[in-house]
Amino acid sequence: MSLPHLMASLTCTYSLPVLSLELIETVVDMLSFNKRALERFTLTCRALLPRSRYHLFNAIWLQPTFAEADSLCGFLDIHRELALQVHTVTVSFRRHEDREVAVHFVQVFLPRLLRKVPHIRCVKLCTNASRKWDAPASFHTSTLAFVKTTLHLHELHIESIRFASHVEIVRMLAALPLLQSLECHHVDLCARNDIIVTAHLRASQLRRLSLNYDRSNSSSVATLLLQLTRSTLEELILRPPRQPEDLGTLDFPFLQKLVLYTESSLDRAEGILRNFKTPSLQHLRLQVESSIRFGDHLQDSQTAASSLEPLLLDGSKRVTVEIEGGRTNRMGRWAALFQRILPTLHAQSRLAVVSSRGE
């Protein structure tokens, strides 16, 4: 039976006794990404309501207005069974959002909301602002104590947030002992305190870290997080600026996958790999934008490749060069280019050039 016919059957009361509960839930699961379809399911038939409601409340998204916040908290107080189904909370700040209000929202309302969803696993703080909040984020000790003893966060995504200092980042990580995945995009600092950094190098148990940084203070955040997590990381994603600062020599004993974004040549990748000790690395992915004319930087790329390739030949490392938005008619030329500048890896069948869009 085709999916449209199956959906039609599900919305007809007289057909439901013929369909098993497993089949009904399978169809709802197939449309779990479609919020509008889930909303219609909840209003169409009681048999569709439980599974549809599960997907609707599994991940909730809100823009921070205090009226919405109070309404949501009141709703969760009344419907405790739905609060238990919330696993992901995404807070998306509007471009024109007042920065003081936004920071107050994070510091005051978010802990209040998290108290009501004990099964929370992932929190995402996102903003469309063109620049970071002027007011720095800081967390009260009692809030962090509650987070540490009550919540079981496994994932945290933060974007365009300015912390008061390194201390706040360290305190945040220390309050999340079960955190396994952290994504930081354009996270900045107001001040730096190296003494605190050296005193808290065992604050994290992260397995996956994604860093997108573009300024000197953002580079300081990147350096701090790499120091805090180097002994446990298994996957690292780096999108450094065009002219990155030296992150220093770091040892990653358990790192298995490394993703590097490069916008011009292989110089940046070569410099990072030279300073990173990765004895367990099995997969290196170089993410290249297809709009870059590599021919303009071919000489620099070949020079960097002559230093890059020896760093990869030890062990069974496999290198994947992923062309972002690479078109089918251009992929052959990209493949030929990297086969030429990384000849030994190509000869050993350890080099792959692919398109990130699968074209």
Image (cartoon, rainbow, N blue to C red):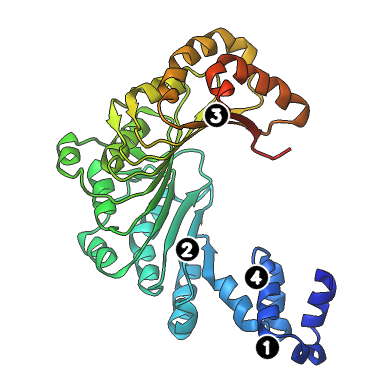
| Vertical arrangement, residue 181 with respect to residue 87, above or below | above
Q: Nearer the viewer, mark 3 or mark 2?
A: 3
Near mark 2 (Cα within 10 A), the count class, few <14, some 14-19 or many ≥20, is: many
| Distance between mark 3 and mark 1 Cα atoms | 54 Å
| Distance between mark 4 and mark 3 Cα atoms | 38 Å
Near mark 3 (Cα within 10 A), the count class, few <14, some 14-19 or many ≥20, is: some
**Mark found first going from the N terminus, 3 or 2:** 2
Residues 173 and 160: in front is 173
- Residue hosting label 3: 350
Local secondary structure at mark 1? loop
**Mark found first going from the N terminus, 4 or 3:** 4
- Residue hosting label 4: 29
Residue pictured at 50% horizontal, 48% vertical: 127
Tag 1: amino acid: Arg
Image marks 4 and 3: residues in contact by CB distance under 8 Å? no
Tell me if residue 244 can be seen.
no
Q: Nearer the viewer, mark 4 or mark 2?
A: 4
Tag 2: amino acid: Val
Residue pictured at 61% horizontal, 28% vertical: 289
Image marks 1 and 2: residues in contact by CB distance under 8 Å? no
Location of the C terminus by quadrant is top right
| Vertical arrangement, residue 85 with respect to residue 122, above or below | below
**Mark found first going from the N terminus, 3 or 1:** 1
Residues 121 and 136: in front is 121
- Residue hosting label 2: 89
Measuring from the top left, give residue 309's x and y in whole percent. 47, 19
